[in-house]
């Protein structure tokens, strides 16, 4: 069954509520933003390494065809090593960006509790309920948008540069072909910026909406903040004993004290 929003949660999440969510490992994540930043960093380093990579590829092709009976000849291995060294900075940039990019939206999060086994997440009917959720519909529309963007970029690349490529093949045509492919990839990366922005905004809005509070919860948190530290510690201990999860959390301070 599709998820139904709780209309009683009309108040924004308090800093305390968001801090508790971070400690539990619940933070907004955008895969599209991470993928776009990885692509952007890889293209930037690839543009810097392009001359070196083209020279290495131009040496690799004749070395591979010179001695087809000896695929692991010293000349071929030396050329392949040059290509690998040219690609190594690109791979390093992609790996480093993949580690740093998720922190741009939610910052560094260390939550050992999120790694604990939770059998409730493996409920067989939860997978079906997610298919009808708002996130699933948004992901489907985002996939269609990416497909449309890819089609437009491919059409633009074929219409603008395919006919200008030289008819001959070989070492002379390689720089022109690489420049044409590079323009197409840059156009695709620029178009994906819209997809990444939409996904990041949606994930952040859904995160804040998921942790919105009711008036009762706001009042309970305000009354709890007025209590001494010892009493607040006892109340939190009783909350943990009552059960884990948002459904087991009391809504008012009177319910906790009672």
Image: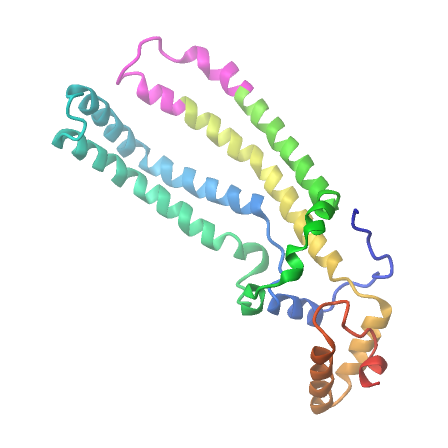
Of 6 and 207, nearer the camera is: 6
Q: Spot the residue most to the left.
A: 74
Residue 178 is inside the magenta segment: yes
Left or right: where 6 falls relative to 193: right
Where in the figure is residue 141, as x and y percent of width and height?
A: 69, 35
Q: Spot the residue most to the top.
A: 167
- Residue 221, above or below 51: below
- Residue 255, above or below 67: below
Where in the figure is residue 90, as x and y percent of width and height?
A: 36, 42
Q: Quadrant of residue 194?
A: top right
Residue drawn at point x = 64 percent, y = 44 percent:
199
Residue drawn at point x = 73 percent, y = 68 percent:
14
Residue 62 is inside the magenta segment: no
Q: Quadrant of residue 257?
A: bottom right
Residue drawn at point x = 24 percent, y = 29 percent:
55
Where in the figure is residue 185, as x and y percent of width and height?
A: 47, 29
Left or right: where 191 falls relative to 133: left
Of 6 and 161, nearer the camera is: 6
Of 23 and 199, nearer the camera is: 23
Magenta segment's dominant SS is helix
Question: Which residue range is magenta in the image?
Answer: 155-179
Left or right: where 205 falls relative to 169: right
């Amino acid at each position: 069954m599709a998820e139904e929003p709780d209309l009683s949660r009309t108040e924004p999440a308090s800093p305390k509520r968001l801090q508790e969510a971070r400690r539990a490992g619940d933070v907004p994540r955008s895969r599209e933003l991470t993928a776009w930043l990885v692509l952007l960093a890889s293209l930037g380093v690839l543009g810097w390494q392009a001359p070196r990579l083209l020279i290495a590829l131009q040496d690799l092709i004749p070395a591979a065809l010179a001695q087809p009976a000896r695929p692991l000849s010293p000349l071929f291995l030396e050329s392949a090593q040059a290509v690998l060294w040219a690609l190594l900075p690109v791979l390093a940039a992609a790996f480093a960006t993949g580690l740093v990019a998720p922190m741009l939206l939610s910052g560094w999060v260390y939550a050992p509790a999120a790694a604990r086994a939770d059998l409730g997440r493996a409920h067989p009917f939860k997978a079906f309920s997610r298919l009808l959720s708002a996130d699933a519909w948004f992901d489907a529309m985002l996939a269609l948008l990416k497909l449309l963007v890819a089609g437009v970029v491919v059409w633009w690349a074929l219409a603008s540069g395919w006919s200008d490529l030289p008819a001959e093949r070989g070492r002379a045509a390689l720089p022109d072909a690489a420049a044409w492919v590079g323009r197409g990839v840059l156009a695709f990366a620029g178009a994906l910026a819209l997809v990444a922005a939409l996904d990041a905004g949606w994930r952040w809005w859904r995160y804040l909406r998921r942790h919105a509070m009711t008036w009762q919860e706001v009042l309970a948190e305000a009354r709890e903040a007025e209590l001494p530290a010892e009493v607040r510690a006892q109340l939190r201990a009783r909350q943990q004993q009552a059960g884990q999860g948002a459904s087991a959390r009391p809504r008012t301070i009177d319910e906790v004290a009672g």
